[in-house]
Image: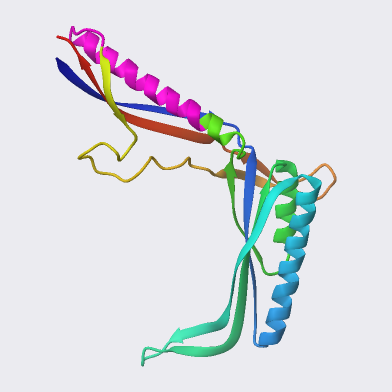
Amino acid sequence: MVTISVTGTATHRHRAERGTVRLGLAREGADREQVLRDSVALHDRVTAEATVHRRQGAATWWSADDVTVGPVPGAWQEDGTRASTGLVRSRSTVAVRFSDVAVLARWVAGIAALEGVAVEGVEWSLSHDRRPEVDRAARVAAVADAVVRAVDYADALGLGTPTLRSLWEPGLRPGAGGAGAAGGPALFARAASPSSADDGSLAFALVPADVEVHAEVSADFVAEG
């Protein structure tokens, strides 16, 4: 009886279905009350536009879950303290998940023109409804890959058909290092030079990269010699 230990992997690529825009909204000045007023006005404008896109169906979700307000620190001094600048900075964050790439591209170009708005990136993903389906397909393919590998090794050694003894996800094999399951897919966007949309408005020509869904297993088979 021979034990054959193998790793099975699978990587499937799918067209991105959602794009989540991350925005940082910041205002700064010497008048604390005015900074706060300007910050709230900017935040309200951005979230109002996000709400419109959600209601019209171009976006599926948005959040605004963080805000910071505080003094702007100055340079370090010899006594180890920071000099006072007399300035106050307010910052909040907004994220909007779009299902319509064209609307996303136009909105990013428009919102980026507002003073105090920083576009911090776009994360591409699959829809929540489709994700379980593609995850399952990748897992099934990874197991099939492990079986093929085990059969190949058994054939090369002149052994009989291998039989599965045990199977683990990454990090679960006893005595093996590593933590948890394999990392999620690398999600990113490739943006071309700014261009004009059909209606003449400025828009980024975004080309979403495919979403990679990866699965990996470790398995032990036994085969008769």
Residue at the spot x=64%, y=52% of the render?
A: 21
Q: Is residue 144 magenta?
A: yes
Residue 102 percent location from the top left of the image: 74, 42
Q: Is residue 122 above or below residue 80?
A: above
- By secondary structure, the bulk of the magenta-drawn segment is best described as helix
Residue 211, visible in the rendered structure = yes
Residue 204 percent location from the top left of the image: 69, 47
Residue at the spot x=70%, y=53% of the render?
A: 108
Q: In the picture, residue 88 is in which quadrant?
A: bottom right
Q: Is residue 213 above or below residue 178?
A: above
Residue at the spot x=79%, y=44% of the render?
A: 197
Which contiguous range is marked in magenta? 135-161
Residue 203, visible in the rendered structure = no
Q: Is residue 64 above or below residue 162?
A: below
Nearer to me, 38 or 112: 38
Q: Is residue 97 magenta?
A: no
Color theme of the render: rainbow
**Image quarter hosting the N terminus:** top left
Residue at the spot x=74%, y=52% of the render?
A: 107
Residue 29 percent location from the top left of the image: 65, 83
**Residue at the extreme front:** 165
Residue 10 percent location from the top left of the image: 42, 27
**Image quarter hosting the C terminus:** top left
Nearer to me, 78 or 92: 92
Nearer to me, 111 or 125: 125
